[in-house]
Image (cartoon, rainbow, N blue to C red):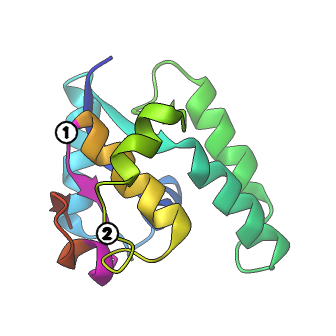
Amino acid sequence: MNIAAVADTHTVIWYIYASPKISRTAKLFIDNAASERLYIGVSAITLAEIVYLIEKQRISRDVYDMLVQKLDDPQNVMTELQVNSEIIRFMRLIPRNDIPDFPDRIIAATAKRFDVPLITRDDKIRAADIKWIW
């Protein structure tokens, strides 16, 4: 599977809803990946984080269902990437002081594992030793 980048949780949500919050650069990168039949990785931790945000009533309940529908569609640019021991080994390479948020660290480790940029607006992640797009 050809992964062009990994998207953080907010990027995934904003892309699905065509939100103006997603940067033009990020949107174009994802659109170009789709046209080149490449994938944007979505860490399984993003699904868990979306459930958490729904429970806190910070996002709409349909976000989870929409994302799962996209992930189930083989023609969609987004593909789920499992959290496994290999990802956790890469997580150990990212100092907790650089990226203290647990889900963000797993997502960043996923990008490191696949040696691709992370699509993120998060300033802490962008300040860390991570390739990023925004």
Camera-side mark, 2 or 1? 2
Q: Is residue 110 above or below residue 53?
A: above
- CB contact under 8 Å: marks 2 and 1: no
Range of residues picked out in magenta: 115-125
Residue 53, how many percent across, how many down?
A: 72, 71
Percent coordinates x, y for residue 37 in the rendering: 26, 21
For the residue pair 132 and 83, the one nearer the viewer reads as 83
Three-letter code, disc 1: Asp
Residue 9, above or below 101: above
**Image check: 93 left or right of 91?**
left
Q: How many residues crowd around disc 1 within 10 Å: few (fewer than 14), some, or many (20 or more)?
A: some
Question: Viewed as shown, does residue 28 lie left or right of 74?
Answer: left
Give the residue pinned by disc 2: 95
Mark 2 or mark 1: name the one nearer the start of the chain.
2
| Tag shown at residue 56 | none
Reading the image, the residue beneath label 1 is 115
